[in-house]
Each structure stands twice: as C-alpha cells, then as structure tokens.
Image (cartoon, rainbow, N blue to C red):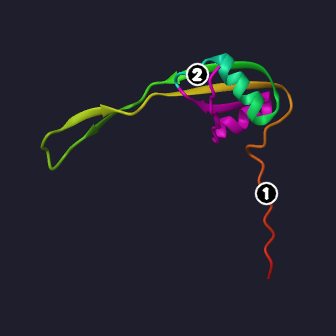
C-alpha cells in the first residue's frame, strides 16, 4: 500500500453529515481506492472506519479570453475526488474551534 494523504473538507453539507450521521468528507487523490482511504483515515486520525463511499467530481468547463474578443477558448478545471467516510467509533476534530481569550 502507498501513503495517501486525506484532507477534511469543511463546508455546511459536511458539517450537517457529521452531526447527523457521523460521516466525514475528505478530499483524496484521484488514484486512491477505498482500502487505501480507510487505512489513511485510521492511521492519521486514530479512529475506526465503518464505510467509505467515493465519488469523482468532474471539472467544470471555463470560457476565457485573451484580449478583447480575440482568441476565445474553453478549458476545464481539474477533476477532484471526494470520500464520504462513516466512522464506527471515535470522532475527528474538524469543526471544533479553539476558544481565544482576549486580554485587556
């Protein structure tokens, strides 16, 4: 197995999934499979994973122009892969904030 780096995705939908279903959303490399993602989450965060669901989000096509109405063209953004990881036990501190005390 190779080393896979997973990063938590912080959004409103991800927060709702954490509070209701104990499911976390991660951005993962396109080449990672479910077994590698499961091993990476368990080793990075020290939790037990129950289920991993992945999806590939196709990059949107973008129109661009170089100059005023000259050489118009289209390109597309990079594809990205997300993993929805359901934990059987434990929690990951993604949305918890550190309380900052202001001194006067």
Residue 2 appears at what percent x and percent y? Answer: 62, 23
Residue span colored magenta? 1-29
How many residues crowd mark 2 within 10 Å: few (<14), some (14–19), many (20+)?
some
Q: Residue at x 52, y 24 (%)?
A: 30
Residue 72 appears at what percent x and percent y? Answer: 18, 38
Residue 18 appears at what percent x and percent y? Answer: 76, 34
Q: Which residue is at the far right?
A: 89
Q: Residue at x 29, y 32 (%)?
A: 75
Residue 38 versus residue 84: which sits nearer the camera? 38
In the rendered view, does 3 fall on the left or right side of 85? left
Which mark lies nearer to you, 2 or 1? 2
Question: On residue 18, which mark appears?
Answer: none
Name the quadrant containing residue 23. Answer: top right
Q: Quadrant of the N terminus?
A: top right
Q: Which residue is mark 2?
A: 32
Q: Secondary structure at mark 2?
A: loop
The question of residue 82 being in magenta is answered with no
Question: On residue 98, which mark appears?
Answer: 1
In the rendered view, does 77 fall on the left or right side of 28? left
Q: Secondary structure at mark 1?
A: loop
Name the quadrant containing residue 13. Answer: top right
């Amino acid at each position: 197995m190779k080393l896979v780096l997973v990063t938590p995705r912080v959004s409103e939908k991800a927060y709702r999934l954490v509070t209701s279903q104990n499911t976390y959303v991660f951005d993962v490399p396109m080449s990672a499979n479910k077994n590698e993602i499961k091993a990476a989450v368990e080793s990075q965060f020290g939790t037990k994973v129950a289920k991993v669901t992945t999806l590939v989000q196709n990059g949107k096509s973008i129109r661009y122009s170089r100059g005023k109405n000259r050489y118009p063209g289209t390109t597309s953004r990079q594809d990205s892969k997300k993993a929805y990881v359901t934990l059987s036990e434990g929690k990951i501190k993604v949305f918890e904030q550190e309380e900052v005390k202001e001194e006067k």
